[in-house]
């Protein structure tokens, strides 16, 4: 039983830290969801649910979740090896022998050596405990820098977007600001980096799922909101603007949809390819007002706004349901074009293994 528990802990560590692919680890998810539940209780005790309060409380979710996982792995490893030491003491299975077993496990795991074991089997267990402990500490040392490096890469481009569009960013505002800067014909400088950003997002936020809950340094910035703004801008550029075709906007859009789909599958968010005439949460009036604002600023807009709306609705239906769930799940700030609300139900990742069709 102790050996099986040790193997379970190591499997959770390997899946979370080492394995470079989206493989759910139930132990890590359980710890992370427990931290969120504690913060939700704190939010209820505060008695306020406005965005500023939620942002202040949930800013602790990801850091506390990461450290709770590390302490859980270390604590379970210590207790499992203590149970193994205790099982080898067949003559005095008592409270005293249990305390002695915990001392042996801690001394071996932290390589302190203040409580040397006696006997060949105990020496083998002690060496194994020390090896596992050192491996766990080495993985932690490399895990945190990798996590925060991915976080820094994500936030750098979000900050550039906010500098270009203002806060909160939106698709129409991105196109308007680019037109005003006389760089509309150079939108490639937007689509190229954001295509790479989406590719990195899909890989990093499934390999390190905690990243999705790390909030931006500025309360009004958020990766879900930035993704929605760029995807809306690409969709508007393709469907509503009367300008020459630009393939990089389509590539950026496809990269974004693929990244959001990968994250949704990992988190167990149900989604299916939309039907051709699928409805979206963004209203036609909001779309028309956005197009009118862009036209007033000088951006060429297709004369047939109804046809432009149908094309835009068909395009946005491919990513809006995923954005809506992820935005509510991570308590993201909203823009006038955002598809989630403060009172939307929040999806919780399932603890059991996800089976995909």
Image (cartoon, rainbow, N blue to C red):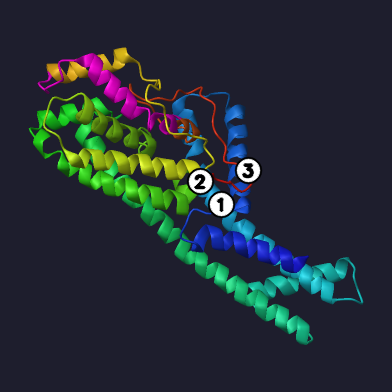
**Earlier along the polypeptide chain: callout 2 or callout 1?**
1
> Residue 24: which numbered mark, if any?
1
> Residue 33: which numbered mark, if any?
none
> Residue 266: which numbered mark, if any?
2
Please identify the residue farthest to the bottom as the structure is shown.
120
Looking at the rendering, the stretch of residues picked out in magenta corresponds to: 297-324
Which image quadrant: the N terminus? bottom right
Residue 59 position, x and y percent, is: 47, 40
Residue 154 position, x and y percent, is: 34, 47
228 or 80: which is nearer to us? 228
Q: Residue at x 32, y 36 (%)?
A: 226
Q: Main secondary structure of the magenta part?
A: helix
Residue 206 position, x and y percent, is: 46, 50
Please identify the residue farthest to the left as the structure is shown.
182
User: Image quadrant of residue 280?
Assistant: top left
Q: Is mark 2 in CB contact (under 8 Å) with mark 1?
A: yes
299 or 328: which is nearer to us? 299
Q: CA distance from mark 2 to mark 1?
A: 7 Å
Does any portion of residue 269 appear in the rendered image? yes
User: Image quadrant of residue 104?
Assistant: bottom right
Q: Nearer the viewer, mark 1 or mark 3?
A: 1
Classify mark 2: helix, strand or loop.
Answer: helix
Q: CA distance from mark 1 to mark 3?
A: 16 Å
Task: Please name the residue that numbered disc 3 is placed on.
Answer: 34
In the image, 58: left or right of 146? right
Q: Residues within 10 Å of mark 2 (few under 14, many from 20)?
A: many
Which image quadrant: the C terminus? top right
Q: Residue at x 91, y 74 (%)?
A: 92
């Amino acid at each position: 039983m102790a050996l099986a528990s040790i193997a379970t802990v190591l499997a959770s560590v390997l899946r979370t830290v080492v394995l470079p692919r989206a493989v759910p680890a139930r132990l890590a998810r359980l710890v992370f969801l427990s931290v969120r539940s504690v913060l939700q209780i704190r939010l209820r005790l505060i008695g306020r649910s406005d965005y500023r309060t939620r942002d202040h409380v949930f800013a602790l979710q990801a850091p506390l979740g990461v450290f709770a996982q590390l302490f859980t792995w270390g604590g379970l490893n210590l207790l499992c090896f203590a149970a193994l030491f205790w099982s080898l003491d067949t003559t005095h299975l008592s409270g005293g022998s249990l305390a002695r077993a915990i001392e042996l496990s801690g001394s071996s795991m932290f390589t302190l050596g203040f409580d040397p074991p006696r006997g060949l089997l105990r020496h083998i267990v002690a060496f194994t405990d020390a090896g596992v402990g050192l491996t766990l500490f080495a993985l932690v040392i490399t895990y945190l820098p990798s996590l925060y490096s991915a976080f820094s890469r994500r936030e750098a481009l979000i900050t550039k977007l906010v500098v270009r569009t203002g806060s909160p960013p939106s698709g129409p505002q991105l196109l308007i600001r680019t037109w005003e800067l006389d760089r509309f014909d150079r939108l490639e400088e937007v689509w190229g980096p954001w295509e790479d950003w989406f590719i990195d997002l899909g890989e990093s936020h499934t390999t390190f799922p905690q990243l999705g809950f790390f909030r931006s340094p500025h309360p009004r910035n958020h990766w879900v909101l930035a993704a929605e703004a760029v995807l809306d801008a690409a969709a508007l550029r393709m469907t509503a603007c009367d300008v020459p075709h630009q393939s990089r906007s389509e590539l950026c859009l496809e990269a974004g949809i693929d990244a959001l789909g990968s994250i949704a599958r990992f988190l167990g968010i149900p989604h299916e390819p939309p039907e051709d005439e699928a409805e979206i949460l963004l209203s036609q009036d909001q779309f028309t007002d956005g197009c009118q604002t862009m036209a007033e600023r000088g951006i060429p807009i297709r004369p047939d706004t109804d046809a432009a709306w149908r094309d835009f609705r068909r395009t946005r239906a491919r990513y809006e349901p995923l954005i809506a769930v992820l935005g509510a799940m991570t308590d993201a700030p909203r823009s006038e074009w955002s598809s989630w609300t403060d009172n939307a139900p929040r999806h919780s990742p399932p603890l059991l293994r996800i089976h995909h069709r």
